[in-house]
Every structure is written in C-alpha cells, then in structure tokens.
Amino acid sequence: MNVQDYILSGIVESYVLGLSSPEESAEFERMCAAHSEVLAARNAFEIELEKGFQEQKLEPPRELKSRIFSEIGKEKSPITQSPLAKPSLIPRIGFARYVAAASLILLAGSVLLNFYLLSQYKKTIAKNEELIAAQTQVADNNKVLQTKMLRYENAISLMQNPLMAVVKMPGVPKSPAPSSLATVYWNTQSKDVYLLINKLPAPKPDKQYQLWAIVDGKPVDAGVFDMAEGISFVKLKTIPKAEAFAITLEKKGGSSKPDMEAMYVMGKVTG
C-alpha cells in the first residue's frame, strides 16, 4: 500500500478520534515520522475537527472530563473494607467503575465523531448545491440555444418560400458605413415584409434603424427594428406595394420622415 492509499484508508480519522488499536496507532506514528504527507493529513484533520467545533459552537459537556478523572481517581484511593463486607465484591465494584470511566471516554469519542460527520455532511450539501447550480446554468443555456435554433429554422423556412420577393439593399454611396448590407423578403401574396440584417453597425442607445418603402417616389414608414445577437430576421409592417426599400438611422422610436443624410442601404424591387 502506497502512502496515498494509506492516508485514504481511514487510519487518520481513526487515530485522531482514538478509535485505532495500539498496533495501528504505533504504525501510524511511525508513518507520520517517515512521511510528511501522513503528518500533514493528520494535522489537517485535527484542524478540521477544531474548526467544526468552532463553527457549531458546541462543546462536549463540561463535567465530562471531571467525571472521567473522578471515576478513575476513586480507584487510586485506598478502599476501606467493612468487617461485614465480602472480599469477593471488591473486584466487582472496581470493574464497574472502570466500565463507567470507559463509557464516558467512548461518549467523548462519539461526540468528536459526530462533529466530524456533521462537517462532512455540510461539505457534501455544499458540493450538491454547486452541482445543482451548474446543471441549472446548463439548462438555461440549452433553452437559449433552442430559441436561437427555432428562430434560424423559421427564418430559413421563410427565405425558401417561393412567394418571397428578395430585395438586396447594399450600402449607398454616401452611407455612414458603405459596407453595410441588408435584405428584404417581401411576400408577394400576403404583402408581409421581413428584414434580414446582413451587416449594419450597432447604433447608439438613443438611435434606432428604420425601414422605408418607396411608394410612388415617396418614403413610407415600414417600421423600426433592433439589432439581435446572431441571425437577425425580423417581421416589419405590411407593405401593399413598393418600388424600393431603404434603411436610415433615426432617433429611437422612429421618425415621420427619413433623415437622408443617415441613409445606410437601399435596394430596388425587381420583377
């Protein structure tokens, strides 16, 4: 048996709690002298027991020590035998006192063992709570992932609908971000408008993007939208007819007229 297996065998706890046999105790002391790991394990367990006492603010009964020494002390005092006493009773009385003292010692050991078991129980409960918290976090992450997957599947299904007219909107020449790109998916039957945000810079907190439909040469509000993490595919207002679509950056909540200086993308309806 190697040193680590020896430590894990339970001998450390048995020795400190006074439950090991004389042979086991002698062997344990030799191991402590020969191996620093064993000595460290012994010291750590003694500190843990002491910490357990302090945390629980519990002590063995105060009278326990005095009772033990009182019982043992009675045996050391001379026994005055009454002339009427039977000699055969004296050993029995002495044996009973030793049994009482031994019982008190076992009681003290039981108190120490209970403190140790309580400390281990608390550690197990703490680890279990950590495990539950980790499992809850994993479950929350799975829900978020499932929501994203459903959104992706819905977007793909709408994009593949043969009734959708696809309007590509690249960045305009004077766009604040010329590399911007967005795509309108316009259902030619229901006239519902969906917007795929391919590439747009994140707006400031007091700003919001707004989609416009160009109808008979005039801009018509098609709705404001927010940026979303991952694929951003949003449903906006229903537009009966349009010649083109464009996106501007407006004050939060949208505007009644587009800010032409803040137009990012624009695309014409074909077909």
Image (cartoon, rainbow, N blue to C red):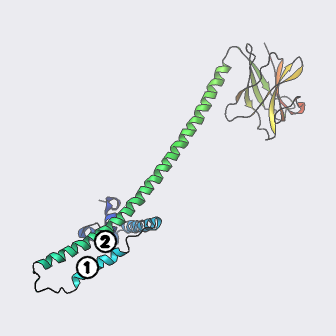
Residue type at mark 2: give it: Glu
Residue at numbered disc 1: 72
> Could you say where residue 88 lies in the image, as x and y percent from the top left?
10, 78
Q: Where's residue 181, x and y in %?
A: 77, 29
Q: In this view, does 44 lie to the left or right of 212?
A: left
Residue 119 pos. (x, y %): 42, 60
Can I make out residue 30 in this image? no
Mark 2, residue position = 29
Q: Quarter-wise, where is residue 235 in the image?
A: top right
Which residue is rendered at x = 45% and y = 64% of the image? 56
x then y, percent, for residue 32:
34, 70
Residue at image point 79% right, 19% down: 239
Q: Nearer the viewer, residue 67 or 199?
A: 67
| Amino acid residing under circle 1 | Ile
Quarter of the image where one finds residue 178: top right
Q: Which mark is first along the chain, 2 or 1? A: 2
Q: Nearer the viewer, residue 117 or 201?
A: 117
Instruction: Name the foreground residue: 104 vs 142.
Output: 104
Q: Which residue lies furthest to the front in this view?
A: 84
Splitting the image into 4 quarters, where does residue 123 fall?
A: bottom left
Residue at x 29%, y 76% (from the top left corner): 68
